[in-house]
C-alpha cells in the first residue's frame, strides 16, 4: 500500500514527498476492483424501482429512486441553492451564475476516470445519484421544473449561463438533445447562453453540429489530463475506462470548426502528474487554435481511485493559474516563460510591475470557465468549492479580497517587501 495518505497531504503545502508539485511517478491511481454482478448497471436501484417524487437530495441512507434523464437532471448544490430548491448558504458567495445540469441514470457514468466521484467502479458502493462529482452533492430535479422556474424569472434570472454536462452512457447524446430542447422551448438562448460540457467518447461530428444548430453557444471537452500518457493512465486503458485522447481531440477539432473561435475549449485538471510546462504548453496550443482552457485543481475525492494521493500543492496550482491567465487573456506566450528542471515556472516572462498588477487584480485566481455577463475573463461558472474545501480555496468563486491576495502571494513565495500573511483558514463549512 502506498505511503501517500490524504491526511498527510496538506492541501496547499508541500506534498508527502516534501515537494511543491505532484510529480508523475507519485500520481499512480489504484486499480479498480471487481464488482458483484447484481450491483452492476444500477442493479439495486432498478431492482427496487422506487418512483421519484420531485426533488431528490443525495442521501446514502435511503433507497435511491429510479430516476433517469431526460426527465431528470442533477445540478450542482450551488445551482440548487440559487434556483431556490435547496436551502443553504455558500461561503462568501450569494449565488452561482451558471446553472450546471448533469445527465443522470441509475446505471451512472460508464467510464471509470480515476479522479472522479461518479466513476463506474463505485457502483458497488453508492447509487449513482448519491455520488459526489468532485466534493459537492448534486441533487436530482425534474427537467421541466428547472426550465419552468428559470423561465418564470425571465430577465431577473440570476443565471448568466446554463451548461449541460454529459456523462458516458449509451443514451447521453440523444438525451442531451432532449434536455436542450426542453430548455430552449422555455428559455431564450440569447438571454441565457448555453454551454455543453461534452462526452466525446460516444459523440459524432453530426452530434456537435446538432447541438450548435439547436442553440448552444460554447462547446467544451473535459480532456482533464494534460498529456496523452496521463490521459491513458487516469481515464483510458489504465483504469479500464473507454476514453481515448485522439477521440477527445477529434471532437474538439469538430467543435472548433462548427462553433468557431472563442466558442470551444477544454477542461484541464492540474496536479495529476503533468509538469507545469506540459500544462501550459497545452494552454498555449488551445489559444493558438482559437479556444480557451478551463482549469481545476486536483482534489483527492474520497472513494475515487486517486483518493490516496495528495491534493495539488497550492504553489504549483497558483503558478499555473497565473501563467494560464497571462496566456489566455493577456497575449503572453509560453515560449517567453522560463521553466526549471522540474518543468516549474521560474519566470513568467513579463516585467515585475505587470506581474504584480495581474496578481493584485485577483482575476487569475478565480474559478475559470465559460464567461457570463460581467467580462470575458470572469467565468459564469464559478462552481463554488468544486476543487477544494472552503478552508483552503484553490479556485476563488468570488473576487479575492486583499487578504486573499496576500495569501496567494505567500503561497507563491511572492510576498512583497514588508508584506506579511499571518496564515489561517478561510473557513470550515460550506452549507448553512
Ligand atoms: S466521463 Fe466524466 S463523469 Fe464519467 S467518470 Fe469520467 S470524469 Fe467522471
Image (cartoon, grey):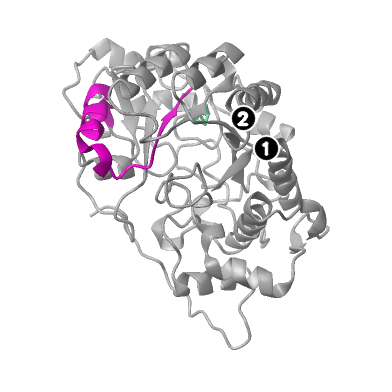
Residue 41 occupies quadrant: top left
Magenta segment range?
140-168
Mark 1 sits on what residue? 290
Q: Earlier in the sequence, mark 2 or mark 1?
A: 2
Comparing 25 with 342, the one in front is: 342
The kind of secondary structure element at disc 1 is: loop
**Is-magenta flag for residue 89?**
no
Residue 385, image x and y in percent?
Answer: 41, 51
Residue 141, image x and y in percent?
Answer: 25, 28
Residue 197, image x and y in percent?
Answer: 50, 30
Residue found 36% across the figure and 64% down from its top: 427
In this rendering, would 307 be left or right of 317? left
Comparing 270 with 147, the one in front is: 147
Q: Can see residue 310?
A: yes
Residue found 58% across the figure and 60% down from its top: 314
Mark 2 sits on what residue? 260
In this rendering, would 176 be left or right of 206? left
Q: Can see residue 10?
A: no
Residue found 33% across the figure and 42% down from its top: 159
Q: Residue furthest bottom?
A: 418
Q: Are marks 2 and 1 in contact (CB under 8 Å)?
A: yes
The kind of secondary structure element at disc 2 is: loop
Comparing 43 with 156, the one in front is: 156
Residue 258 occupies quadrant: top right
User: Which quarter of the figure is the N terminus placed in?
Assistant: top right
Residue 149, image x and y in percent?
Answer: 21, 33
Mark 1 neighbour class, 10 Å CA radius: few under 14, some 14 to 19, many 20 or more:
some
Q: Residue furthest left?
A: 53
Mark 2 neighbour class, 10 Å CA radius: few under 14, some 14 to 19, many 20 or more:
some
Amino acid at each position: 500500500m502506498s505511503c501517500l495518505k490524504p491526511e498527510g497531504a496538506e492541501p496547499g503545502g508541500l506534498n508527502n514527498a516534501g515537494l511543491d508539485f505532484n510529480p508523475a511517478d507519485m500520481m499512480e491511481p489504484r486499480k479498480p476492483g471487481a464488482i458483484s454482478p447484481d450491483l452492476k448497471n444500477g442493479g439495486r436501484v432498478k431492482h427496487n424501482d422506487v418512483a421519484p417524487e420531485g426533488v431528490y437530495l443525495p442521501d446514502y441512507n435511503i433507497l435511491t429512486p429510479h430516476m433517469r434523464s431526460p426527465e431528470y437532471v442533477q445540478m450542482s448544490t450551488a445551482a440548487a441553492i440559487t434556483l431556490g430548491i435547496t436551502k443553504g448558504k455558500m461561503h462568501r458567495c450569494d449565488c452561482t451564475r451558471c446553472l450546471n445540469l448533469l445527465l443522470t441514470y441509475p446505471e451512472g457514468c460508464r467510464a471509470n476516470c480515476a479522479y472522479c466521484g461518479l466513476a463506474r467502479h463505485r457502483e458497488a458502493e453508492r447509487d449513482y445519484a448519491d455520488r459526489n462529482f468532485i466534493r459537492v452533492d448534486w441533487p436530482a430535479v425534474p427537467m421541466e421544473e428547472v426550465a419552468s422556474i428559470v423561465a418564470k424569472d425571465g430577465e431577473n434570472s440570476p443565471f448568466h449561463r446554463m451548461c449541460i454536462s454529459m456523462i458516458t452512457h449509451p443514451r447521453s447524446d440523444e438525451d442531451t438533445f432532449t434536455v436542450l430542447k426542453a430548455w430552449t422551448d422555455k428559455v431564450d438562448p440569447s438571454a441565457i447562453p448555453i454551454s455543453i460540457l461534452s462526452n466525446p467518447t460516444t459523440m459524432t461530428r453530426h452530434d456537435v453540429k446538432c447541438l450548435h444548430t439547436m442553440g448552444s453557444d460554447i462547446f467544451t471537452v473535459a480532456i482533464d489530463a494534460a498529456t496523452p500518457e496521463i490521459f491513458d493512465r487516469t481515464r483510458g486503458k489504465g483504469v479500464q475506462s473507454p476514453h481515448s485522447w485522439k477521440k477527445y481531440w477529434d471532437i474538439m477539432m469538430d467543435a472548433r470548426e462548427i462553433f468557431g473561435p472563442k466558442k470551444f475549449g477544454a477542461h484541464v485538471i492540474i496536479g495529476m502528474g503533468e509538469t507545469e510546462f506540459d500544462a501550459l504548453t497545452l494552454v498555449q496550443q488551445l489559444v493558438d487554435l482559437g479556444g480557451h482552457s478551463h482549469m481545476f485543481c486536483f482534489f483527492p475525492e474520497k472513494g475515487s481511485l486517486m483518493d490516496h494521493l495528495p491534493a495539488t500543492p497550492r504553489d504549483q496550482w497558483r503558478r499555473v493559474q497565473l501563467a494560464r491567465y497571462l496566456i489566455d487573456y493577456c497575449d503572453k506566450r509560453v515560449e517567453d516563460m522560463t521553466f526549471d528542471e522540474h518543468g516549474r515556472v521560474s519566470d513568467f516572462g513579463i516585467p515585475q510591475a505587470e506581474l504584480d498588477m495581474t496578481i493584485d487584480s485577483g482575476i487569475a485566481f478565480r474559478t475559470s470557465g465559460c464567461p457570463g455577463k460581467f467580462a470575458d475573463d470572469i467565468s459564469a461558472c464559478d462552481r463554488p468549492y468544486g476543487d477544494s474545501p472552503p478552508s483552503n480555496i484553490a479556485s476563488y468563486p468570488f473576487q479575492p479580497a486583499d487578504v486573499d491576495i496576500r495569501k496567494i502571494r505567500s503561497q507563491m513565495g511572492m510576498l512583497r517587501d514588508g508584506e506579511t500573511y499571518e496564515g489561517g483558514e478561510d473557513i470550515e463549512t460550506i452549507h448553512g
